[in-house]
Image (spheres, rainbow, N blue to C red):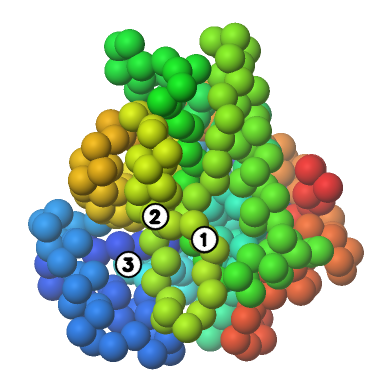
């Protein structure tokens, strides 16, 4: 399609193994430079082996890309779109090289992460910047900012939540608790998220409030909620965001809770950290303490979510945004790298919630 500000779209994924022999090399790439002992990697590898050595994430991201393609065409926008991963094929540098060889020169990147943090946003900008530095490709790249603020993001979660409730389970019942969960990150990373810090927590809390508002509109009752964390992977000496979901489940049982509705608000697909950490470990903890656990789906390819994300992408593809000034959202030192300086490509736009 002519007249667009970009000639290609890259969906950036975390990556995951798709065969048993890929599991340990994948984990070694994920943890490179972090001093994780091989014995720990073998333990984590068992999570993948129990799923046949295949992470769900790549198939889920391919499905999201296909859904976005359809939604973009419905918006009247058509560009070549591809998936590129940080930690497994197709790797970012290889994908950029292939696009350049086909004549692409200006690309828009969209990460499969809705929130601001180093690992969820800036590191994807570094993946692109490092790939350009390593290859010398003549490409101009921009990254769409985090999209947590899309109204359909929270609205889709609330719809999926209500659809997941077993018959007779009442969110207003005294024994029922609503718990949102997201990936724990180091406290230092949380403190530097966004241009002014603390954006990771603020954005999650804002989305949780939007979900609660939508539940109130649908049911007449606005439930109280709490935000908890999962999937920490750092050494015990390093402070990470707490409380852990399993500790919270034990505490709720001690308070007399009978039912917990668990909403993985921090993830957009049911990948390994949802399937293992929630459906396996948290489910076992809930059974141990006598709580009925209801885990709601992630937004995935929910039509309303995909349509709104595609509309935002289409607007950027058509118009192109100026690179923001230093200190603005998704630029410069935003979500600073805790270990080193690395080349990045710019993000775009202002945080709509600031």
Crowd tier of the residue under label 3, counting other residues whose Cα lies within 10 Å: few below 14, some 14–19, many 20 or above: some
Task: For the residues labelled 1 and 2, say whether their Cβ atoms are less than 8 Å apart.
Answer: yes
Task: For the residues labelled 3 and 2, say whether their Cβ atoms are less than 8 Å apart.
Answer: no
Residue that appears at 28% across and 73% down: 26
Disc 1 from disc 3: Cα separation:
33 Å
The earlier-in-sequence mark between 1 and 3 is 3
At mark 3, the secondary structure is loop
Viewer-proximal residue, 317 or 196? 196
Q: Quadrant of residue 310?
A: top right
Identify the disc placed on residue 89: 3
Percent x, y for residue 115? 61, 52
Residue that appears at 60% across and 36% down: 208
Q: Kindly identify which residue carries mark 2.
A: 247
Crowd tier of the residue under label 2, counting other residues whose Cα lies within 10 Å: few below 14, some 14–19, many 20 or above: some
Residue that appears at 56% across and 19% down: 215
Q: Quadrant of residue 75?
A: top right
Residue 310 relative to residue 302: left or right: right
Q: Kindly identify which residue carries mark 1.
A: 242
């Amino acid at each position: 399609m002519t007249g667009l500000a970009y000639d290609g779209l890259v969906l950036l994924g975390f990556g995951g193994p798709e065969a048993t022999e890929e599991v340990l090399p994948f984990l070694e790439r994920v943890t490179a430079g972090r001093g994780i002992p091989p014995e720990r990697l073998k333990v984590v590898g068992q999570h993948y082996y129990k799923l046949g050595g295949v992470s769900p994430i790549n198939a889920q991201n391919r499905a999201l890309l296909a859904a976005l393609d359809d939604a973009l065409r419905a918006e009247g926008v058509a560009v070549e779109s591809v998936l590129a991963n940080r930690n497994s094929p197709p790797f970012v540098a290889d994908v950029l090289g292939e696009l350049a060889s086909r004549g692409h020169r200006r690309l828009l990147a969209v990460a499969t992460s809705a929130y601001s943090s180093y690992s969820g946003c800036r590191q994807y900008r570094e993946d692109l910047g490092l790939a350009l530095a390593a290859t010398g490709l003549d490409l101009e790249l921009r990254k769409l900012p985090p999209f947590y603020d899309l109204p359909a993001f929270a609205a889709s979660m609330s719809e999926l939540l209500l659809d997941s409730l077993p018959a007779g389970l009442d969110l207003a019942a005294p024994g029922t608790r609503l718990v949102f969960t997201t990936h724990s990150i180091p406290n230092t990373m949380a403190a530097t998220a966004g241009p002014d810090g603390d954006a990771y927590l603020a954005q999650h809390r804002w989305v949780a409030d939007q979900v609660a508002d939508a539940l109130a509109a649908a049911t007449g009752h606005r439930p109280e909620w709490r935000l908890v964390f999962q999937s920490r992977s750092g050494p015990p000496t390093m402070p990470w965001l707490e409380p852990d979901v399993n500790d919270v489940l034990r505490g709720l049982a001690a308070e007399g809770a009978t039912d917990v509705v668990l909403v993985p608000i921090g993830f957009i697909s049911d990948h390994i950290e949802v399937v293992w950490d929630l459906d396996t470990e948290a489910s076992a903890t809930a059974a141990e303490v006598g709580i009925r656990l209801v885990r709601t789906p992630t937004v995935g390819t929910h039509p309303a979510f995909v349509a709104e994300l595609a509309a935002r992408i289409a607007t950027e593809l058509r118009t192109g945004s100026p690179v923001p000034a230093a200190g603005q959202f998704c630029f410069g030192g935003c979500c600073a790298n805790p270990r080193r300086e690395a080349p990045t490509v710019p993000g775009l736009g202002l945080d709509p919630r600031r």
